[in-house]
Image: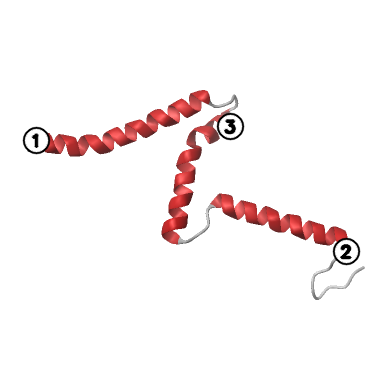
Amino acid sequence: MPFESIIVAAIPAAFVLVIAVGVVVRWVRAPRGVRSRLRHAFGPIAAAGETYQHLHTGQRGLQESIIESVQEQEIGGAEQADGDTTPGTSPR
């Protein structure tokens, strides 16, 4: 019985250790610069969190929200450049 409890405790510890080693390796291989290194090292963990949020809560992740808002801004900017107006306003 003691052997089984050791195995049960060792599996999650090994999983956390593997993730920590992966983060350190990605950080060492990342390009220079503090922000880019951190982003490169923790990128897979952040992506997993966004996927979890999307699958379990049904909410969009931050990356999808940013992409959508940029597309809306580009479309809005193109409409203003063409002289289009929003409903309820008059052109000057």
The x and y percentages for residue 9 are 20, 37
52 is higher (above) or lower (below) than 58? above
For the point 31% across and 36% down, which residue is it? 15
Q: CA distance from mark 3 to mark 1?
A: 45 Å
Q: Which residue position is annotated with label 1? A: 2
Picture residue at 90% right of the left edge, 69% below the top: 91
- Of 74 and 88, the residue lying toward us: 74
Secondary structure of the residue carrying tag 2 is: loop
- Which residue lies under the disc numbered 3? 36
The local secondary structure at tag 3 comes to helix
Amino acid on which disc 1 is placed: Pro
Image side of residue 62 versus residue 81, left or right: left
Viewport quadrant of the C terminus: bottom right
Residue 71 picture quarter: bottom right
Q: Is residue 57 left or right of residue 63?
A: left
The mark that comes first in sequence, 2 or 3, is 3
| Residue located at (46% from left, 51% from top) | 51
Give the crowd class for mark 3: few <14, some 14-19, many >=20 residues within 10 Å. few
Res 11 quadrant in image: top left
Q: Amino acid at mark 2?
A: Gly
Answer with the quarter of the image where residue 34 lies: top right
Mark number, residue 83: 2
Say which label, 3 or 1, has the lower sequence index: 1
Residue 74 percent coordinates (x, y): 75, 55
Residue count near mark 1 (Cα–Cα under 10 Å), binned few <14, some 14–19, many ≥20: few
Q: Are marks 2 and 1 in contact (CB under 8 Å)?
A: no
Q: Residue furthest bottom?
A: 88
The quadrant of the rendering that contains the N terminus is top left
Give the residue type at disc 3.
Answer: Ser
Q: Secondary structure at mark 1?
A: helix
